[in-house]
Amino acid sequence: MSFACPEKIRQLWPALMLLVLPFTTTAAEPIRIQQLQRCGDLLETRKQTFCLQVQGLQMGAWQATLNGERLDVAQPAGDQDGLQLQIDAEGKKSGPLLLEQAGRQSNPVWLTLGTSHVVAATADEVAKNMDGLTSYVDLVSLIIEEDYDGAKEAQRLAEKYDARVVGMIPPLNTYQLRLKADNLDQRDATVLRLGGEVSVDAVVIEESGAEEAIETDADNGPPADNEEWASNRFLDAVNFYQRRLQQHDHKLQTHPIRIGIIERDVDFDSPDFADYVGDCRKDGQRTCLYARDAERPDGHGSTVTGILAAAWDKGGNSGFLRGLDKVGPGFDVIVARDSDAGITANVAASVNLVEDGARVINWSWGIHRVGAIDVNGDPIDSLVRSGIAMSGYEELLEEFFLWLRQEHPDVVVVNSAGNGSSFSGRDEYRLPSSFVTDQLFVVGGHERSGENVSVEDPQYAIKRKASNIDMRVDITAAACVHGSTAEAGKEGEVHCGTSYATPLVAGLLAAMLSINPELEPDQLRMLLRRSAMTIGEEYDFEPTEGDDLTAPILPSERANELNNPDVGRSARLDMYKALDLTVQSLDRVR
């Protein structure tokens, strides 16, 4: 037996310790883009600056790509969490932005080179008004009359009132001004004078904090929540798209459709969305998701988006468009909201998405006017705005839909009816759902009745108590869904509201357009209504004041079924039948 000398042992000691100690390594933190906003001069359209909040980037080289092309960016020497990109928009187009470092890729976010951006107020730039609502002190938006050059006129007015132009929505001739105002009295005095200018159509006062623009339903989820989507024949529709389209006499060619969702963010660490990290477009037939990353999986954005895009059998959810992947055309689901500047930011983001090619826009939000009452005559106390703010929003939304009709008549907007047990169609009560235009679809909510009847039976589903009602509601869909979770295979808590009924309709419309992209908004509505099942309680007498859950189904919307006893009753979404009628409409054209 021989022994190593003490000097040899000292030299070998580090290696010996590695053998006896447990081997551990710390995996690099995933790269997550949590925020992406225009910053700097928002009026500059050529060289645009974007501010990013990024988690997981380490010291060292990294690269950014836009639409798969590498960007030349300066490597900051300081804090890696806050980054800036400056992009020359000449020759480039909007698309997915990715960051990569040492083989790790970020979540893809949609970087728009559109020109519509507005500034959000900070915590010290807001105050409580007489209604107790948070209101912007020095930021307002001017809707300039169409006969004027909006940019020049906004600048002239800014100089006249000692203000600065800081944001804009050029297609709507709308420009955001920062006023010389230290309180609401000073602001209101300036707003009064601005409103009297011949060139000003309306002044938009922002009262909606972005975090508040979420429609909540306080009622408990139904006991049979796992059967909710059966009310709309969800799985039948997926099966139809996956199988029947391929068995068609002439195998149908589907067309890629882009969907815009006005929400904040999505949790890419949730199993529902984890496989969207990196370059999604390597597979041209799969659904792709572009969004900022959320810290928690159960947020409003993740839940709304999951109804369209959640991976199947991963986190308890099943996204409708994701279920069409094997034969689908490659849907783009873009979750975008450039800033937290309330309703004005919602409209600005929608304009950019439409200009970036979105055919369907999902608006799972809405607001009520102060003093609005529900169906029982009680006041609504959530998501309310003052009369002066509502007037400005109404003008802004009117400009949006006028622009949509003139410049993008093939685009549809799908809006939640709301959860105030109120009336969706009265403009003194709720926006945007009160607008009457072929391009706006309004969606109410229903739930399973618990009755042991077939899915086609009107008693299979009943109105969700909180859902807003009336003739302006086009159709109803299941209001309850499971939220995403951080653990694979685990079902999340049940979330209910018309916010979650809305993406079921938006996703279906996208699928219908992928089959027949020539369908116009009024044709889409006709197919939705014609295919709908009925819903609701039996009445001995017709509801007063037309207070139906949805607009009554007309005989023409029942095709040749004029003797159907359900004619006139409210409409419940039938996703399977709507796709079937879409294919039939294509056959008739052929």
Image (spheres, rainbow, N blue to C red):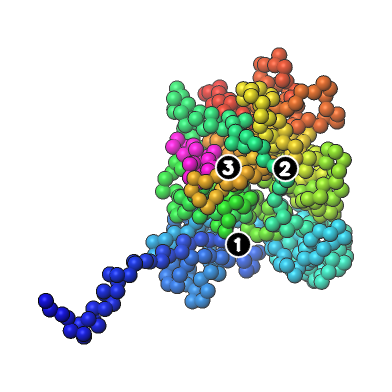
In the rendered image, which quarter contains the N terminus?
A: bottom left
Instruction: Compute the Cα span from label 1 to label 2.
Output: 35 Å
Query: Of circles 2 and 3, which is in front?
Result: 2
Q: Which residue carries the number 1 mark?
A: 37
The residue drawn where x is 73% and y is 58% is 209
Instruction: Compute the Cα span from label 3 to label 1.
Output: 26 Å
Residue 219 badge: 2
Q: Which amino acid does label 2 sit on?
A: Asp
The residue drawn where x is 69% and y is 34% is 446
Give 92 or 138, whichever is nearer the viewer. Answer: 138
Measured along the vertical axis of the image, is residue 370 above or below residue 504?
Answer: below
- Give the magenta range: 311-329
Mark 3 / mark 1, whichever is N-terminal: 1
Query: Of circles 1 and 2, which is in front?
Result: 2
> Number of marks in the image?
3
Disc 1 is placed on an element classified as: strand
Viewed as shown, does residue 101 lie left or right of 537? left
Residue 336, can we see it? no
State the image coordinates of residue 556 (x, y, percent, origin top left). 70, 21
State the image coordinates of residue 189 (x, y, percent, origin top left). 88, 65
Asked if marks 1 and 2 touch (Cβ < 8 Å), the reply is: no
Q: Quadrant of residue 432?
A: top right
Q: Which residue carries the number 3 mark?
A: 307
Q: What residue type is labelled 1?
A: Gln
Measured along the vertical axis of the image, is residue 564 above or below residue 165?
Answer: above
Is disc 1 surrounded by few (<14), some (14 to 19) or many (20+) residues within 10 Å? Answer: some
Which residue, as the protein is rendered here, is positioned at the far left?
1
Disc 3 is placed on an element classified as: helix
State the image coordinates of residue 47 (x, y, percent, origin top left). 57, 65
Is disc 3 surrounded by few (<14), some (14 to 19) or many (20+) residues within 10 Å? Answer: many
Residue 583, can we see it? yes
